[in-house]
Image (cartoon, grey):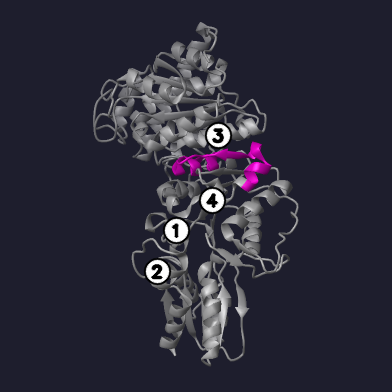
Amino acid sequence: MSAPSAAVPSAATVSAVKEKAKLLSIYSMMATTAAGSGHPTSCMSAAQLVAGVFFHAMKFDPKNANSNDADRFVLSKGHAAPVLYAALAEAGVFPVSRLMTLREFSSELEGHPTPKIHGVDAATGSLGQGLSVGAGLAIGARMDKSPTRVYVLTGDGELAEGQVWEAAAFAAHYKLDNLTVIADINRLGQSEPTMYQHDMERYRLKFESEGFDTQVIDGHDVAAILAALDRAKTVKGKPQAIVARTIKGHGFSQVADKEHWHGKPFSKEQLAAAIQELGGGPTVPPDPGKSYERTPLPTPPDFPEPPPPDYAADAKVATREAYGFALKRLGAANPHVVAISGDVKNSTFSETFGDAYPDHFWQGYIAEQNLVSVAVGLQARGKVPFADTFACFLSRAYDNVRMAAISRANINLCGSHCGVSIGEDGPSQMALEDIAMFRAIHGSAVFYPSDAVSTERITETMARRPGINYLRTSRPKMPILYSKDEKFPVPGFKVLKKSADDKVTLIGAGVTLHEALKAADQLKAAGIAARVIDLYCVKPLDGKALAAEVAASGGRLVTAEDHWPEGGLGEAVLHALAAAGAPPAKFKLVAVNDMPHSGKPDELVDAFGISARDIVEAVKGLM
């Protein structure tokens, strides 16, 4: 849908924004010179664009810079952080003097933005993720019926990232007309010119082909920038792209449009020459050292206890199915819960929630990187997002998960179809690395339920818990182990079999817990009493409590998991026991032992070393 013509900005408005742009450029140079590192030339190409957004287009409250009633800005080209910080300072979020603490250990103004800074919703700097975050913010605003607009500034180098176009397709599909992307096409990358350099027509066609209303402008013509921003606000039914031709290092002839200046601050002499060339600049007073860190960061909103799950005692239910039932129960109790699926909603069963709450559910299609970063944007507006796909495909989005942790984001991820137990689909669909992946994420929780009740209760816990929460669900149907009133604290585990005569502790989760229970029965027939633990929470672990159980069974331990041995459940247990000062006297890690292939689930569990038979053999080896 084409937009009507916007009013021409007044000469006074253009002049005022030009002056702001000059200040942003100078502050960026001064801050990076003071720091002795940073990316001044990347800031200088964007100074007019950022000034146009902050001091003309945006509705922005410096006293409440992350307000849901205000517009939002995402700096996808995170290495240009100084120009964002300069805009925030000039807008009044913190004093200009604070800019001179850039990159210092005691300063919240890090080399790339994080939400520790007021006015920042997500960490950026791993390029290509900002448009996805912006799409999540825009969807959240639409849900809230808020007039909020979202502005995303990208660089041209990062437009080589496939995720940018995942996000562009997603935004256009959902007609996010409250989302404007501004592309800073300054021609130069880090090591050499970018792929398309200043071929503006190529960029225009790319955005238009995805369904964006697209304008190509001179990114240093302030009048053109303001007119383009005004016009973007009038577009209905489409996201907008403002593709701006810029010069890296604009305003300082010694570096403008010259290679090999990426990430290099100016010397004091060069800084003085640059400021003089720009017509002179302000004197910045010494910083008093007061921190302006954003604390506390948001946590998931509380909600009433939903009704308990209800399953027949003799039912067999896959944990992936129970995840969908849990989301539906949560939806009734918590209006902030939202879900997004990577075109697998009928396999992860998130469609159960989507059918009940269609206005809270989005199809992410087969674009896992975008899936995770959209969830980051949603949580920044106070939503409680659950994103799901097959667990193996979350490896494709691992960098997004890593960045979500740096963002201090509160997101919930469900990876289904884990391990060899999925059966016939073969190894390309079998997640055998995901526990290791998510254990390595700072502050994460890794949950691996073994029945429907524990799945539902853990999903409830995830909705309340801040940080990155990962739920590992399985394909096979499993018997019910717990009553509907059972609780699953974090950290925690459940002891399912126990006696004073136990000679070994068996620890499993998911399908291997059920194999451990079978193994315990077989061992009992052979005269060996075994303790069986359901490790539903793989991270964090209560090492002292685990150590007491292992010690009570003679210090012998066998762990079993549908995962590679590296970084999985077994290594998590050993690390926790060692940290508690109580490593087992004897142990064996039972894990997938070779590259799997297609077959029936039961025969694969047996063939690749994680069946009850393998657990029994491991125990006998310890005895």
Residue denoted by label 2: 592
Report the disc number at residue 347. 4
Judge left or right: residue 95 versus residue 368: right
Comparing labels 1 and 4, the label whose residue is closer to the camera: 4
Query: Magenta segment range?
Result: 352-377
Alpha-carbon neighbours of circle 1 within 10 Å: few (<14), some, or many (≥20)?
Answer: many
Looking at marks 1 and 4 on the same chain, the residue that comes earlier in the sequence is marked by 4
Q: For the residues marked 3 and 4, what is the alpha-carbon distance in whole angstroms?
A: 48 Å
| Image location of residue 94, percent across then percent down | 55, 34
Type of amino acid under label 1: Asp
Residue drawn at 24 percent across, 29 percent down: 259
Depth check, front residue: 231 or 12: 231
Could you say where residue 240 lies in the image, as x and y percent from the top left? 49, 22
Q: Is residue 112 above or below residue 43?
A: below
How crowded is the residue under tag 3: few (<14 C-alpha within 10 Å), some, or many (20+)?
many
Q: Which of the two discs, 3 and 1, labels the residue nearer the N terminus?
A: 3
Question: What separation in Å lies between label 2 and label 3 (alpha carbons)?
Answer: 54 Å
Q: CA distance from mark 3 to mark 1?
A: 41 Å
Residue type highlighted by circle 4: Ser
Residue at image point 67% right, 33% down: 144
Q: CA distance from mark 1 to mark 2?
A: 13 Å
SS class of the residue under badge 4?
A: helix
Evaluate if marks 3 and 4 touch, with contact meaning CB atoms under 8 Å apart. no
351, 169: nearer the viewer: 351
Above or below, 225 against 106 in this view is above
Nearer to us of marks 2 and 3 is 2
Task: Tell me, for residue 94, which label it has, or none.
Answer: 3
Q: Nearer the viewer, residue 274 or 160?
A: 160
The tag earlier along the polypeptide, 3 or 4, is 3
